[in-house]
Amino acid sequence: MISLLLSSAFAFVLVIFVTPIAIRILRRRNIGQFIQSEVEGHMHKQGVPTMGGVIIVSGAVIGYLLAHFKVFTFGSGFGFVSQEMSDKALLGLFALIGMAIIGFADDYTKYARKRNEGLSKRWKFGGQLIIAGVFAWGATAAGVSTDLSFTRPLGIDLGPVLFFVLVLLMLTATANAVNLTDGLDGLVAGSSALAFGAYVLIAFWQSRNPSFYQVDGSLDLAIFAAAVLGAALAFLWWNAAPAKIIMGDTGSHALGGALAALALLTNTQMLLLIIGGLYVVETLSVIAQIISFRGFGRRVFLMAPIHHHFELKGWPETTVIIRFWILSGIMVAMGVGLFYADWVAGPGSIVP
């Protein structure tokens, strides 16, 4: 429990104090955001420092690692002690860092070209598939259940091939869904903090009920989720409207990859559709817009993703952000509630 709190605290403190330094460095190097001209009311964001996702990922990784070292233990006194890291939490770190690298390549390409055009879809998707493929192989080697799951495995074994396909789908889809949502100041930082908070609770509860959930390394997964939560909250301090820094594709891809990884590693694959419901809605709005426009020549929304639709309807940006946070919070609460309801209905019992 102490390691879990330390993980979040280390990540939070590191990110909240390092971000202002990073903002000054990025400004001196003119590494700023490029804004689409058709997005009305966003031109003031032109040039705002971007690639802030590097800070989120660095803070989360360092926070997670530091939480595994102790210099004082109650009952034993002072003494350097290191705790073992689980292979599943390391897989979560791989998904976080791997997807961040793809996002960073996209951000850097935009910076190099001096316009809002990053990697081609082929290169970006190809890179995401490589990261997802390695993760799928690692998950199989680590003994992650290949059953389809909701709050826990449903008893439907997908087998290695279909599980591999599921991993590819979840990692790439979630990374891109979070990326689509990242269009307003603080929207992803705030909503993802809620989602990672849910996975802190889920993984910690699994660690307290090992015979019921049978997820090895669940406490370490909670520590990992807590580190990302702390980093996201600290970044939100500087990313809240009006943003002093933007996470860019580096951050959105990393957070999306980590969320999908946690869902796979905690055997809550389909529950992610509820906990990450905001990202599902944003993605569906884009799909609906494309199908409607290409198939019928008409638009469903004034602009997609849907948060831009409400902006064009006259909602102030902060109003859209706060209301979407509320919706995200409701969905996260529903997800955690369903997870707990399943435990209540089952034969679970808390391990002292």
Image (cartoon, rainbow, N blue to C red):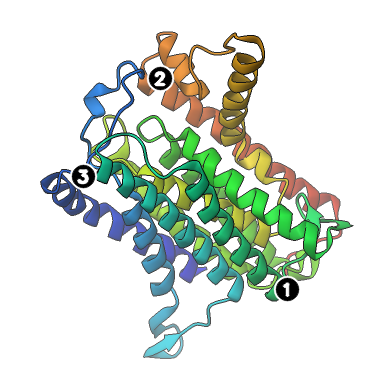
Give the quadrant of the C terminus: bottom right
Q: Amino acid at mark 3?
A: Ile
Name which quarter of the figure residue 241 lies in.
Answer: top left
Q: Earlier in the sequence, mark 3 or mark 1?
A: 3
Q: Secondary structure at mark 1?
A: loop
Residue 36 image position (x, y, % from top left): 33, 25
Kindly report which numbered mark, 2 or 3, lies closer to the viewer in this rendering.
3
Q: Amino acid at mark 2?
A: Thr
- Mark number for residue 319? 2
> Is 253 rendered above or below residue 331?
below
Alpha carbon of mark 2 to alpha carbon of mark 3: how far?
A: 28 Å
- The residue tagged 3 is 31
Q: Earlier in the sequence, mark 1 or mark 2?
A: 1
Residue 88 image position (x, y, % from top left): 61, 70
> Is 7 rendered above or below residue 46?
below
- The residue tagged 1 is 143
Residue 201 in view here: no
User: Going by the image, does 179 lie left or right of 52?
Assistant: right
Q: Secondary structure at mark 3?
A: loop
Q: Residue at left 23%, top 40%?
A: 32
User: Going by the image, does 3 lie left or right of 24?
Assistant: right
Alpha carbon of mark 1 to alpha carbon of mark 2: how far?
A: 45 Å
Near mark 2 (Cα within 10 A), the count class, few <14, some 14-19 or many ≥20, is: few
Residue 238 image position (x, y, % from top left): 27, 42
> Is 209 rendered above or below residue 198?
below
Residue 96 in view here: yes
Near mark 1 (Cα within 10 A), the count class, few <14, some 14-19 or many ≥20, is: few
User: Going by the image, does 258 lie left or right of 110?
Assistant: right
> Is 130 rendered above or below residue 284?
below
Q: Secondary structure at mark 2?
A: helix
Alpha carbon of mark 3 to alpha carbon of mark 1: how far?
A: 42 Å
